[in-house]
Image (tube, coloured by chain):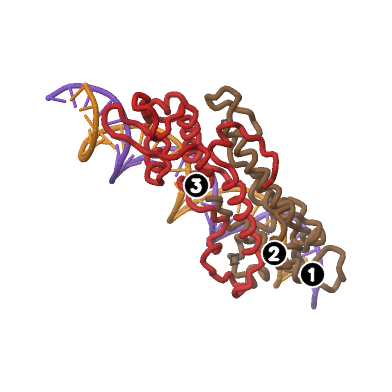
Chain colours: A brown, B red, C purple, D orange
Amino acid sequence: MFNVSTKTQYGIRALVHLARAGEVVGHVQGNPAATAAAIARSESISPKYLEGILSLLTTAGLLVSERGKHGGYRLARPPREVSMLEIVEALEGEIKPVDCIDSREVCAQGGSCLPRLFWLGLKESVDGYLSSRSLKDVLEGEADDGRA
Amino acid sequence: MFNVSTKTQYGIRALVHLARAGEVVGHVQGNPAATAAAIARSESISPKYLEGILSLLTTAGLLVSERGKHGGYRLARPPREVSMLEIVEALEGEIKPVDCIDSREVCAQGGSCLPRLFWLGLKESVDGYLSSRSLKDVLEGEADDGRA
DNA sequence: GGTATTCCTATGGGAGTGCTAGGAATATAC
DNA sequence: GTATATTCCTAGCACTCCCATAGGAATACC
Ligand code: FES
Ligand code: FES
């Protein structure tokens, strides 16, 4: 249960790769952006598949892309300022265990649906964990000390 | 993301239904077990589909079934002693964001994979929430006060 | 025997996942 | 301005899983 798609897994690994290489917007001009092909090779990911994933992250504002020769991708912000919740939501959509979580569709119970509260709590628990971790934390292998 | 299947949603609603009616093993003999058809009608769930779900819950030891006329299902234990983690795992399998969570397959990183720690933390967060809630909590619409 | 129930197996449409392929748009290099 | 290297866009396909439906076998009561 709760399988995370390869799309998200690859996306995170690519972001970690970029953060490691220090490829952030505003660096020295001589430091070229990493290309999709290079990341794919280094991480053993299907190149064309990864292209699409990086495009998504660019649209979401997490990456900055440069086209043409010597083009590639850079992080739009330093790793510390990127929460894992942002990343996951950009690739996987909102965390939504059940559909009735935002739209109050009544499920036979007529509005006072008990399970709904339970699922809502689950969403908050997941959101809480994800937003408490930044890309930098993942990068540095932060052990999950506190549960805050 | 993190969609919970209808199988699990229906299963939980059925369990809540049974708990509400107070149909626990060891009650008065006159109190008949609830049939799958009755629950399906009351909860507006496809009858044959629900049958399979209740069978799963029986195999998992959460329900006790009686076949033949006047048969049906009862809770195997009082709601207080049934954790939501048990229920979810019975229907949905283990919480496993990524496959490498138990088997230490190296993903190009050669063993020191950073993202893996992150996913492990997510699993622990979800497991923590689910095991902290009992069926009785859901039944009573326990608001999620503490995050413990 | 008749009836009501759980239990088992098979089937099928639909949606989503995980890629693959081809090319268009864009920017540099010579 | 032609060649080259890159991102970007769209389409398609095999595969799996989800959700349900259907038919009947096994079981237990009357
Ligand atoms: S309203 Fe969603 S489970 Fe009841
Ligand atoms: S070992 Fe699973 S993501 Fe690296």
Location of mark 2 (residue): A143
Image marks 2 and 3: residues in contact by CB distance under 8 Å: no
Tell which subunit mark 2 falls on.
Answer: A
| Left or right for A66, reference B16 | right
Q: Is residue A54 above or below residue B34?
A: below
Q: Is residue A3 visible?
A: yes
The label shown at residue A22 is: 1
Q: CA distance from mark 2 to mark 3?
A: 27 Å
Q: What kind of element bears circle 3?
A: helix
Q: Nearer the viewer, mark 2 or mark 1?
A: 2
Q: Is residue B130 above or below residue A111?
A: below
Location of mark 3 (residue): B86
Residue D13 vs residue C18, the one in the foreground: C18
Tell which subunit mark 1 falls on.
Answer: A
Tell which subunit mark 3 falls on.
Answer: B
Q: What kind of element bears circle 1?
A: loop
- Name the residue rendered at 67%, 47% in the picture: B148
Instruction: Identify which amino acid the numbered label 3 is placed on.
Output: Glu
Instruction: Identify which amino acid the numbered label 1 is placed on.
Output: Gly
